[in-house]
């Protein structure tokens, strides 16, 4: 079975690749989870974050953005002592801030899902990358989304982080065409397999 090379060599990465990465997400809690995790990843490896995912789930109330939006300075100090997560003040404060901005998006669009998928007209973008080098770090789409998120007050949402989010939640299918998941994700995206 052939898969994207970045997922080889580690069971945790393989499981994530084989079951989650690129599957279209439409639940706001899952969107918030990936926003928190992708922002935490800045400057680190995805494996580092996956190893801490359960600790993040506990620290951030199961990624319940309505709870996280209420975190105060005392809770932030508590999280800075949590050895299970990345103890970076700016990243923790960004997660709390982003939960508040997340609620504002929901007020304006009904759901974060409607907002984010609206940038792709509700349909996943299916790329046809043959090598890892073909996969961009960011695109015009991620530039637009990042700019809009920043305008709305989100933090730690540069274009590269946003592109990772778009890949993770299936708005962009960047599985290599040789990967066994490529036709499966393409079908989930509403297209015909290659």
Image: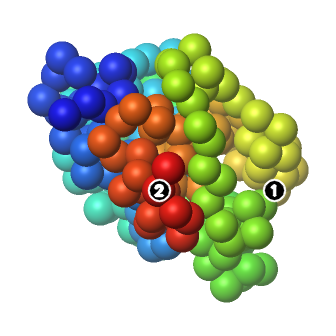
Observer-nearest of 7 and 90:
7
* Residue name at image x 40 percent, y 32 percent: 178
- Crowdedness near tag 2: few (<14), some (14–19) or many (≥20) residues, C-alpha within 10 Å: few
> Most extreme residue toward the left, as rendered?
11
Q: Nearer the viewer, mark 1 or mark 2?
A: 2
Image spot of residue 142 (x, y percent): 74, 41
Question: Badge 2 is on which residue?
Answer: 193
Question: Badge 1 is on which residue?
Answer: 152
Q: State the mark number for residue 7.
A: none
Say whether disc 1 or disc 2 marks the residue closer to the N-terminus: 1
In this picture, residue 68 sits left or right of residue 6: right
In this picture, residue 128 sits left or right of residue 57: right
Which image quarter: residue 77? top left
Residue 11 seen anywhere in this rendered image of the structure: yes
Image spot of residue 156 (x, y percent): 64, 35
Under circle 2, the secondary element is loop
Image spot of residue 155 (x, y percent): 68, 41
């Amino acid at each position: 079975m052939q898969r994207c090379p970045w997922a080889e060599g580690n069971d945790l990465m393989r499981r994530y690749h084989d079951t989650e990465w690129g599957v279209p997400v439409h639940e706001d809690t899952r969107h918030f989870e990936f926003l928190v995790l992708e922002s935490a990843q800045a400057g680190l490896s995805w494996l580092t974050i996956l190893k801490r995912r359960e600790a993040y789930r506990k620290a951030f109330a199961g990624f319940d953005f309505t709870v996280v939006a209420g975190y105060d300075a005392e809770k932030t100090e508590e999280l800075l002592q949590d050895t299970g997560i990345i103890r970076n003040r700016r990243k923790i404060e960004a997660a709390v801030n982003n939960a508040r901005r997340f609620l504002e998006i929901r007020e304006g669009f009904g759901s974060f899902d409607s907002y984010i998928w609206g940038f792709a007209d509700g349909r996943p973008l299916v790329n046809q990358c043959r090598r890892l080098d073909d996969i961009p770090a960011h695109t015009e789409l991620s530039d637009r989304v990042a700019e809009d998120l920043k305008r709305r007050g989100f933090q730690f949402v540069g274009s590269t982080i946003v592109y990772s989010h778009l890949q993770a939640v299936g708005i962009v299918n960047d599985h290599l065409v040789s990967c066994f998941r490529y036709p499966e994700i393409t079908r989930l995206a509403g297209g015909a397999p290659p």
